[in-house]
Structure formats: C-alpha cells, structure tokens
Amino acid sequence: MSSAAGTEAPLIEPSRAASRPPAERSSPTGRSSLGWLFALAIAAAAFNLRPVVTSLGPLLDQVREDLGMSPTVAGLLTAVPSLCFALFGFAAPGLARRLGPIAVVTAGMGAITAGVLARSFAGNTAVFLLLTALALAGVAVANVLIPVVIKRYFPEKVGPMIGLYSMALSGGTALAAAVAVPLTSALGGDWRIGLGVWAALGALALLLWIPVLLARRGSGGPSGGAAAGARLPITRSRTAWALACFFGCQATGAYVVMGWLPKIFQDSGISEGTSGVLLAVTMVIGVPVSFVLPNLAARRGDQRLFVVVLASFGIVGYLGLAFAPAGAPWLWAVLVGLSNCAFPLVLTMIGLRARTAGGVAQLSAFAQGVGYLISIPGPILIGRLYEATGEWYLPLGFLAVLLVPQILFGLRAARARHIEDEAVPAGAVAAA
C-alpha cells in the first residue's frame, strides 16, 4: 500500500532501503547529517507539546482575575485541550496527504509559537481562548504526525525514536509545571510574561524544523504531499478501536492527575509547595521511563506485559492516595507517575500496529482523536464527585476501577496485529 504521508526522503541506510516497500524508498543524499538534525527537531517539537497547558495551570488564578474570566469558563479550560487535540488531530492526516507531514509539523510549531506569544497580550477572555486554541491546534497536528514521521523516516528505529519523543514530551511537561510560578516571579510577577516566555521554546523548535523542511524539498521530492493511496476503513479494525479506548482511559487518568493531584495532597494536610513538588515527581519519573519503555516494548512481539504492569502501579497508587495520602506521598506520586507511562506505551503501539507511514497516520489520528474525546468528561466528573462527597475516596476509587477496562483494551491492542489486515479497503478482497 502506498504511503499517505507525503514523499519526503526516508532517513534509512541504503542497504536497508532496498528491502523497504517502494513507497518507503527515496534518495539517500545527505542522510547522515540530516538524520541528526531531524532527531533533534523531533525532540524539540515534543518538548513544546505540553507547556501550552501545564504552564497555564499554576497561573490560572492570575489570568482569571486580570481578564475577568468567570469560574465556569476557567473550569471549561480543563476540557479545551482534549477537545482541540481530538478535533484538530482528526484533520492532521488529510493535511499530511496534501502538504507532507514535515510541512504540517513545521506549521504546527509556528502555530504553537504564535499562539503562546500572542495570548500573553490578550485583552479579554474570548481572545485568550481563541489564541490558546491556535496553539493547541499546533500541538494536535504534531501529536498525530510525529509518530508518522518517525515511522516513515526512522523505520528501523521506531522504539528508540518514540522513546526520545516521549522523554522530551515528559521533560517539557514536568519543566513547565515545576517552574511556571518561580519563573514568573523572577520575571517580575506578571503572568503575561510568565506565559509568553514559553514561545521562545516554540521558536527554537520552529528554527530546527525549517531547515529539515527545506532539505527535504531540496532532495528532489515535490513540495506537497503525494497521492494518498487507498484509505483504510479504519473503523472496521478491532485493534484500532482497542487502541483508541486504551488511549482514552490513560488520557483520562493523566489529565485528572495533572489537574487534581496537588489538591488531593493539600486536603491531606500537605503544604502547597510540597504538593507541587509531588506533582512534578509524577511527571519527572516519566522522563527516563519514557525513553527506555518504547525501546523495550518495540522489541517484543506484543506489549501485554507492560499494559498489566503499568496499570497495576496505578491501582496501588490510587488506593494509597485514597486511604493514606499523607502516609507515603512520595511512593504514591512515583506509582501514579509510572502508571501514566502508559502514554509512551500507546504511542509505541500506534507505530507498531500499522505497516506503513500512511497506516500509522490514520491510526494515530483515529486513536488519539477518539481517545481524547473519551477523556474529556474525566476531569469534570472527578470534580463533581469530589464536590458531591467532599472526600477523595469515590473519585480515586473511580480512577482505580477505570484501570480495569484500560487493561482489557490494552491487552487487545497490545497483540501483534496490523490494522491493514483487519481494515481491508472496500473492493480489495475482490480485486485480489
């Protein structure tokens, strides 16, 4: 099947290129030096995919007060990232077919940079939300297409490259959450400067992607995307649905943790400063694990062992938070952080469950789009349960129970299958 992801030259060795399908081959000119630049650009892009969200949370009270934002609108901000990731993520494969995935990711870095910088000058809530959505649109297309880029240009190194991508993403998430407040204070205490400064990281990533884009065009490939080939009826694939539901379950837990974990610790008597550090621990633990886990997972025929182990960490962590949050807070933070490493695992499985870059593009958009839609009610429901009971037993019990379907969907998604074998294009069987 021909690739649906553009015609840029794959960065693979000539000896291995011969064994790839025709749609995956291209000229090896300039491969070595561009490969290093490409890897660095992928890491820089990944580092920018969460500060848009995690730098805002600690400063939200200041933003609300200055812009006159109502509590209802502020509450909706918790659902906006998942909604944008889903809606714009669904559009990413179509854009990649027209323009090529590198061009779309480059544009995504431009959108992140422009949105983050411009929203720091917003004079009202509507403009702030619109510019935040612009930045999140850039995040969404990069979310979907970076695994596609890795599959197409590093087909022999999917595990290590997904590991690099996941590690950089976790690092950006943790850094923004940990330093947003002290950095803003060091820069004079103005939230506009504290949020706008993150545009510098987006600009750096953009500067790395521009020469990659130009080098690809200079290598002889056309400036736009190639003909897409047959689109898979992906909704026929049980593996695709399992991946989408697995993604949705893990995303629900991750966004609840990012939004509510400090409050859980504070309600148990732990100080605000320590609770913030504990949240950072849950994110930092994902940095080394996100680098190692995809490589280990890619070496196995299936990834079912990892699905069960990570979920088991989460069950113990959530129960510990429910019944003894102040008893071993560092242990619970580490266990919950390890459970959230289901994210790099599902990214790895997306790259492994399709044979071609075009298949990965469709699977990535479907799994992440549907998955993020599934995750939208999670943080809101947790808030309602807490408001109704005044305790964390029921919300944390819900998160622990949610890991059971996560395991079941994960076990189905982790089997060594390819969506091309399940989602056969209409007429393909008859033609064969």
Image (tube, rainbow, N blue to C red):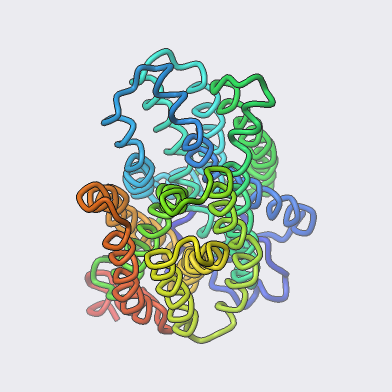
Q: In which quadrant is the N terminus drawn? A: bottom left
Q: In which quadrant is the C terminus drawn? A: bottom left
Asked whether residue 389 appears in the rendered view, the answer is yes
Query: Is residue 223 found left or right of 133 in the rendered image?
Result: right
> Percent position (x, y) of residue 36?
75, 55
Given the current orientation, which residue lies at the most extreme top position?
Answer: 123
Residue 334 quadrant:
bottom right
> Percent position (x, y) of residue 83?
32, 44
Choose between 349 and 306: the one closer to the eye.
306
Query: Is residue 69 found left or right of 12 in the rendered image?
Result: left
Image vertical order of residue 198 relative to residue 274, above or below: above
Q: Residue at x 52, y 21 (%)?
A: 120
> Percent position (x, y) of residue 44?
65, 46
Choose between 215 and 288: the one closer to the eye.
288
Q: Residue at x 31, y 76 (%)?
A: 404
Given the current orientation, which residue lies at the most extreme right position?
Answer: 33
Q: Residue at x 60, y 21 (%)?
A: 189
Choose between 327 and 63: the one closer to the eye.
327
Image vertical order of residue 23 relative to residue 7, above or below: below
Asked whether residue 23 appears in the rendered view, the answer is no
